[in-house]
Amino acid sequence: MEALEKWNQQVSKMEDRPCLESTSPSTYTEGGLYEQQSNTCLSPVTASHCPPGQRCSDSVMCSLEPDFSQPALTSKYGIDLASSPSVVKVIEEDRALWGKQAFVTNTCGQLPPLASTEFTVDDQGNSSPHFVRCTTYTLPTSAELANISHFPLGVLLKPLGTVLPSEGPIPLVDMEGTDPVQCSTCSAYVCPFMQFVEAGQRFCCPFCYSLSDVPWRYYQHTDRMGKRVDHHRRAELTRGTYEFLTEEHPNKVTVTPAFIFLIDVSQNAVRHGVVHQVCEELKHLMSSPGQMGAENCHFKVGFMTYNTTVHFYNLSSSLSQPHMLVLTDVSELQVPLLDGLLVSIHDSRSNIESLLVQIPSLFAEQEKEEETVFGTAVKAGLEAVKICGCPGRLFLFHTSVLTADRKLSSWNIGAYKYKSPFQPQVAFYQDLAQDCVSHGCCVDLFLFPNSKGIDITSAGFISLATGGRFYKYNNFQANLNAAQFATDLNRALQTEMGFSVEVTLLTSKELKVKAMYGVVVESKSNKVKLAGMDSNKTFAVELEHSGILKEEHGAFIQCALSYTNFSGQKRIRVHNISLNCSSQLVDTFRQSQAETLITFLSKAAFSALPDSPTKSIRDGLVDQVTHILACYRKNCATSLVSEGQLVLPQFLKVFPVYANCLRKSDVLLPGDDASIDERAYIQQILLSMDPAETAVFLYPCILPLHIMTDNAECFPNAVRCSSVMLSTNGIYLAENGLILVLWIGANAPHELIQSLLDVPAFSAIWCGEYSLPVLNTPFSQKVRKIVEKIQNQRTRFLKLFVVKQGDTKEKLFQSLLVEDKTPNGGASYLDFLYHVHISVLRLQK
C-alpha cells in the first residue's frame, strides 16, 4: 500500500506540473557525470504479440509501475533505464538483419532498412529508400482515420541521391528524339505502375485513372498478361528510378554552368588568415581541375573580391597578367566587363594562378576595418551569370557582419517587420534569393565568423533558398582548421550537382500535397524550384486526403526532377513508389519507422521557426507525440493493458527519445552558450539533412574505444547516450554529424592514453580542438581508422575535440548525453517518457 500511495502521489505531481522545462537540471558529481537520485527499478520491456483477430499489432509494453523493492539506477519516477526502449539496440538489430542481404523493392509498401544501416538495394519497381522514404508505408484510407491517428502522412525526398557502386548506375532512358511519354491528363511520366490496354495502344494512369494514347514511336503490343513484350528491356517499366534525356540530340553539350569564387578581402579577413588560406586552396584546386570535374565538363570559372567595393578580374588568356576593375558605386551595379570574366581553367591557368598569388598581398595593408558589401557581392555574381546566359554556382568566403547591405537604400530594401530571429531582418535577402533561383544561380557559403557574429539567419537564407551548401568556421585558425576547410571545399566541388532544378510531386488522385518543408520556405504547391541541388539535399512533403483511398488499389507517388547536369545536359530523373492502404490504423503504425518520422517532424518544426515561437513548437511536438501514442493505445492495443504500462508500436518504440532530443535541442530550447548565429546555422543545415544524418544529430553515436582488442572489429558497439553507461576507466568517441568528441575518463589506463595521444598521464592531456597524432601503435591506428571512416560517412568535415573528465570543457561532451537532463532545463528521456505516459492516460479519460 505504501508503494501504491507513492505511485499515486507521483502521478498527481506530474499532472500538476505545467511543462517539461520546469524540471530542474541534474546535479553533477565531481567527475562531471550526472548524479542518479532514485533507487527504484522496473521490469524489463517485453514485446507483446496479440493473437490473430485482435486489434493490437506487435507492440512494446514499457512498464511504468515502480517496484520499490529492487534498488537500481532509475529516474525519480521509478523508471529503470534498462527497461526503456534503446536507440542503440534498435540500430544494432536492424544492421544485423540487413547487413548481409539486399533490400529488394518488388513489394508494395515494404518497410525498408533504417537509414542508419548500410545496405544495398535491388531496384525492381519501387525507388530505393536512399531516394524516397515515407513516414508510413500503409496509408489510412480516409482523412477521418488520418485525423484520428494524428500521424503525419509525409514523404522524404532525396532526388539526386547517389547509388552504391555495387548497385550499378541509374538507368538512362533515350527516347530517340521524342519527348518522354506522359499522361495526357496529369502529366505523370511513364512508370512501372501504368497498365497498357487495347493491345498496347493506350495506357491507364495510376495517378488520375485516365486513359492516354501511346505515341506511335513508343508503341509495342502486349502479351496475354497485358504487359508489353519489350517490358524487360525498358527501365521505365521495370525500375523505380531512372532518367530521361530531354535533348533532341543526347550527345549535344549545351551551355555548361559557371563557377564564380567571391572572396571577402576586408581587413578582418586578411588579419585572421582567411584570405591567404582561401587563395592557397583555390590555387591547389585550379592546378588539378580533375578534382572539380573540369577535365570532362570544361566549365568556366571567374573570380571576384570585395570589401567596401567589388573587384572584377579579367583573366583572358590573351593577357600577360590579370587585370582588375573596381566597382566603386555599389548602388548602381553593372558588370564592367564581359570578355575575360569567365574563362576556361585550361586556357587561362597561368593568369588564374597569378591572381591567387597576388590577392593576399594586394589587400594586406588596409587603413581600417570597414563594413563589407555581402549582398552586393552576391548580386555581382548573379549579374555575371545573367549576362553569360548560363546556370551558375557562387562560392562566397565571408567573415564580417551583414550590416552594409541595409544602407543601400537605392535597392529599395525597406524596413522588414520583425517576426523572429530565424527570419532575415530585411526583405532584400529574400528578394535576392528569389532572383538567384529565377536565373539558376546557386550560392554556396563558407562563413568565418569572429566574436561579433555574422547574421547567419540572413546569409544562410540565400544559401538555403537557392539550394546551396553552407559551412561555418568559428574563430578560424589556419593551423587547426585548414584540413577542415580544404575537405569541405573539395566535397562541395566534387558532389554531384543539378542546376536550374524543378521538382514536381504527383500522387494518387485521392491525395494532395499539403506543404513542403526544408527546400525553401513552406510551399503548398506540388512544385518547387531551386537554383541548384546536390546529392545530399533532402526535403519533406506533407500529404493529405482529397478522397477515399481503396485498399485493393493502393496509393502511388511519383517525384520528377528536371535539372541540368555538369555537362550541360537537360535530364529528368523520375522516382516512383507504391504504398498500401488500410482502414485499420494498426497497419499504419506497423509500417512506420522512428528515424523517418522524426526527420519529417524536425523539418516541419524548423520550417515553422520564422513564424512561430519556439515554445509553441515544443509544446506542439509533445502534443503530437502524446496524441499519436494515445491513438495507438486506444485503437490498436489490447484491453488487457494496465494503466502502469506505456504501449509503443514496435517500430516506433524509440520515437519518444528522438522527439525529446528534438524538443530540447539548442535550436528549440537554447542554453546559455547557444548564440542566435549558432542556432540559425543548425536550423538551416538540418532543413536539408537526410534521415541518417538527422538521426545521428538528434541521438549521437558514442563508441567505447577502450574495449577494442587487437582482433576486434573496427567499430565497437555503441553505448546509450547516458552518463550511467559510461565508465571512468574508459575512453569514448562521440559524434553527432557535426563534431567529434573524444572523452577520457579520470581512471583511463595510462598506457592507452600514451598510445593514443602521446602524453604520459591523464593530468598531461590538453583539452580542446585537436588533431590526433600519427603513432605506430595498434590502438592509435584503430582509432584513427574509425575517425577516418566517420569522416567519410558525413557530408562535412567533423572537428575533433578532446575533453577529459572533470575539465571545464567537459560540457561539450555532456551536451551529447541526450538521455540525461540538460542544464538548459531539458527533461531526461525517462522523465519525458513518464510525462508522455501520464498525458496519454489523461487523454483516455
Image (cartoon, grey):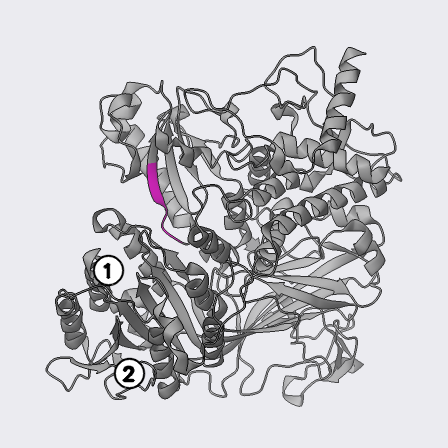
**Rendering coords of residue 271 (x, y %):** 19, 57
Q: Is residue 28 visible?
A: yes
Task: Name the residue type under label 2.
Answer: Asp
Residue 632 highlighted magenta (yes or no): no
Quadrant location of residue 649?
A: top right
| In-front residue for pair 381/215 | 381
Segment tinted magenta in the rendering:
796-801
The residue at 68%/69% (across/down) is 192
| In-front residue for pair 647/445 | 445
Badge 1 is on which residue?
Answer: 268
**Rendering coords of residue 314 (x, y %):** 20, 82
Badge 2 is on which residue?
Answer: 329
In what element is the residue under mark 2?
loop
Q: Is residue 551 visible?
A: no
* Quadrant location of the C terminus in the rendered image: top right
Quadrant location of residue 357?
A: bottom left
- Neighbours of disc 1 within 10 Å: few (<14), some (14-19), many (20+): many
**Rendering coords of residue 73 (x, y %):** 59, 19
The residue at 29%/50% (across/down) is 475
The residue at 66%/81% (across/down) is 182
Q: Which mark is residue 815?
A: none
Q: Are marks 2 and 1 in contact (CB under 8 Å)?
A: no
Mark before the other along the chain sequence, 2 or 1: 1
Task: Name the residue type under label 1.
Answer: Asn
Answer above or below: position of 421 versus 434: above
- Measure the C-alpha gap from mark 2 to mark 1: 22 Å
Answer above or below: position of 765 versus 474: above
Answer above or below: position of 32 versus 307: above
